[in-house]
Image: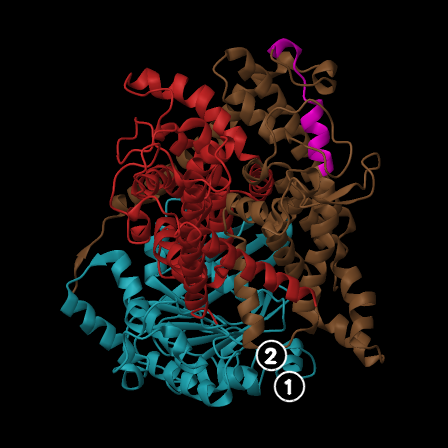
Chain colours: A cyan, B red, C brown
Amino acid sequence: MNDHSLPGTTMDQPTTTPHSPHSPHHGASASAGGASDAGSAANISTPATIAIEMRNFSAWYSKNQVLHAIDLDIAAKQVCALIGPSGCGKSTLLRWLNRMNDTIAGARATGGLSLHGAALLDASLDVVDLRRRVGMVFQKPNPFPKSIFDNVAFGPRLHRVYSRTDLEELVEQSLRASALWDEVKDRLTSSALGLSGGQQQRLCIARAIAVGPELLLMDEPCSALDPRSTASIEELIRELRATYTIVIVTHNMQQASRVSDATAFFYEGKLIETGPTDVLFTAPKERRTEDYVTGRFG
Amino acid sequence: MLSVITTVAIIAVLIKETVGFFTMADHPEISVWSFFTGTEWSPLLGAKPLFGVLPLVCGTLLVTVIAGLFAMPVGLLTAIYLSEYASQRVRTNLKSVLEILAGVPTVVYGFFALTFITPFVLQPLWSGFGTYNAMAAGIAVGIMILPIVCSLSEDALRAVPQSLRDGAYALGSTKFDVTIKVVVPAGLSGVVAAFLLALTRAIGETMIVALAAGGLAQLTVDPSAQVQTMTAYMVQIFLGDAPAGGVEYRSSYAVAFTLFLITFVMTWTGAIILKRYREEYD
Amino acid sequence: MLGKPISQSKKMRLNRMLMIGCLAATTIAVLVLSALLVSIAIEGTSSLSWSFLTSFASRKPSQAGILAPLMGSVWVCTICAVVAIPVGISTAIYLEEFARRSRVKRLIQLNISNLSGVPSIVYGILALVAFVRFFGIRPSDEPWTFGNSQSIWYLQIPFGPSVIAGGLTLALVVLPIMIISSQEALRAVPPSLRQAALALGSTQWQVVWRVTLPAALPTMMTGAILSMSRAIGEAAPLLVIGGFLLVFQTPANLMSDFTVLPLQIFNWSGRPQADFHKIAAAAILVQLVVLLAFNSIAIIIRQKLQRPLQS
């Protein structure tokens, strides 16, 4: 198979998963290791495992269907961007990945959705443990009104009992990984609400990675931030890619092209096209994709 | 212009109380008078002119503590239920009921204490409860302040932004974690303010204790005994035919002043707490 | 580096405990309050009758009625409303719309909220000196007199233990609450409304009178009604200023003696005979019905008249 490697993808997994039998009318899947249909030269074939598999996945809020029969594979240790105009369902999709929609009355979903093989829609799934394995960063930074230390330590303390030194190490590690350590190391006990917007968002990222997740979900993490903070968070995302699978919802197409390896374009609840980012943006297959990425609508 | 009237009223209250208090100072009879301010140490208040305010304060405290021990946990837990667990319909209905209850005249609770709590609840449990006892009054005051605690605490908890709960859930919290470790600490200032307000009302409560707690001022922590609170003492004086300038009469002014001071300090503290912790949000 | 994991079953247990605890508390609250209502209803309904409402108190419980306290409450609360509502609203308007943010204003504000926490009996004592005795400037056996004793507007200074003193006392009690709730009603009016009016060239007074006040009025009325419902239930301050426990006539003029319903309840409750307890319960039922009526009116007003202030 072609070994067309994309900028930034890691090549550590020698195994590839078999290409899924159904992908057809929704474009090539974004996972590596499969022949794509429609013979374009731009399929990703870097060997990598698939972190998330969606098969015929649909979602509703009460009677309102917001996602229609999505088939999508998301590769591990890559950044996948979900783009599309407002209301197209991308945030909903994101929230199903850690079952956050359980907190919304009337939300339900059907179809196949699995994370590293575990079926997420299964009624017997331990949702609390799922959310430990999947971290989420929200649009508007939401640090708890506690100290910086307690914010980062909150997650770990939920799941395990730690000694004080272990906890301090963990907090330091997480803050270093989110590029915040140097700025806050002298004031770990001060309130998190005293940080700037960009710092708060990095704190939320540190908080999310402190529990040691496999997957990071980011729902428009920079939309409430100024350009400089946005740039630093984007750089952070590029660094985090080495350790975590990241799915990011964004309205900002330039951001998607800067930050992600693969992109999926949604429109009105359907997956229109997906593929490696540079391909999707320079040579999209679908007309609507092209219209969206060139700014003709949305 | 009208604010002047209000300010005058405020100052008037303050001055009046002080004047009323000091008008006792020139009473020729007992030298204990001059020690009244620092005086809280002598035992009995009554026909024998030994005027130490401590038994009354103790009575007030006993009743208030009982009331608080009942109303604060029950009120807070109910508030948590309303804000975190209950459906919209249950919440609206219960809140309207609470609002109405907050307007029930306190005599009603006093009546309830005397005619129901003591005979049907307390005395069957233990025959040591007399007709008048601190426990019944305390429970009744607790019931009276329960709607206040519940309603205000619920407001405080609901004011906590949903984004905080979402953040906690996303880290793998159970409902217990979210509620106890995030929501309640975040809303704590409002809850504490609610508790203070309720306790202030409990301290100032008159009719319940006048009916149910008894008329014997004694320094005791035994809830089955009679106690007299500061407020009940004032009622006793004014119900009676004490002459306008008499010793007992003026002593009730002194008691009123003490009461005023206590509630004033508590309200002030509540306002400070609210202000200090409200800043944490924005 | 990793600590000991917290087991899922422990988490489930804590979760359960919290839910059970909250449910238990809510049930206790509801049960206790229901017990209150039920026990009173059981005791009191048998004594309710038209004659109960229209006769006066008497030594014999079977013949006693609540006419005097009912009318007393009506008189006293009317006076209270007439005084407290306008004063309260005007003060609130002044504080919210005209006063500049200064230390004086904050002091006044703080004082008002402190006053709202003062026990009502303390107001009674203040009123005793201020209204009943008039600070002692005139001995009560040689009062200044205005008008003749046949008309309602008969006035004597000092007031003595009369309905007008009672009304003013209640007004004092209710005033801080009125001010605070009116202020909040005014604050709820969005600034964009005021700004629109100003931009059209109104004076500040016109803005208040024609825009802000009408917009805040429904909420203010709700607040007024709730304050009044609190006033109806007050007994302690009226006791202090001399509302008598046993009055055999309805008030004839502003200087009449009076009693109010809560005081009558207090009186009957304090008697040892069980029959008096029965009629006390009946009086309570009447009181609660009045309370309910007031609250329902307030809720209806709040729902019907409160048009959204901005889309």
Identify the residue under disc 2. Answer: A285
- Point 79% across, 41% down: residue: C154
Identify the residue under disc 1. Answer: A294
Main secondary structure type of the part rendered in magenta: helix
In the depicted structure, whether residue A197 falls above or below residue A209: below
- Point 53% across, 17% down: residue: C277
- Report x, y in % for residue C170: 63, 44
Q: Which residues are magenta?
A: C60-75
In the depicted structure, whether residue B89 falls above or below residue C42: below
- Residue A114 visible in the picture: no
- Report x, y in % for residue B245: 48, 42
- Subunit under mark 1: A
Q: Compare marks 2 and 1 and give the one earlier in the sequence.
A: 2
C89 vs B276, nearest the viewer = C89
- Residue A193 visible in the picture: yes
- Amino acid type of the residue that numbered disc 1 sits on in the rendered structure: Thr
C2 vs C203, nearest the viewer = C203
Could you tell me if the residues under marks 2 and 1 are in contact, i.e. CB atoms within 8 Å? no
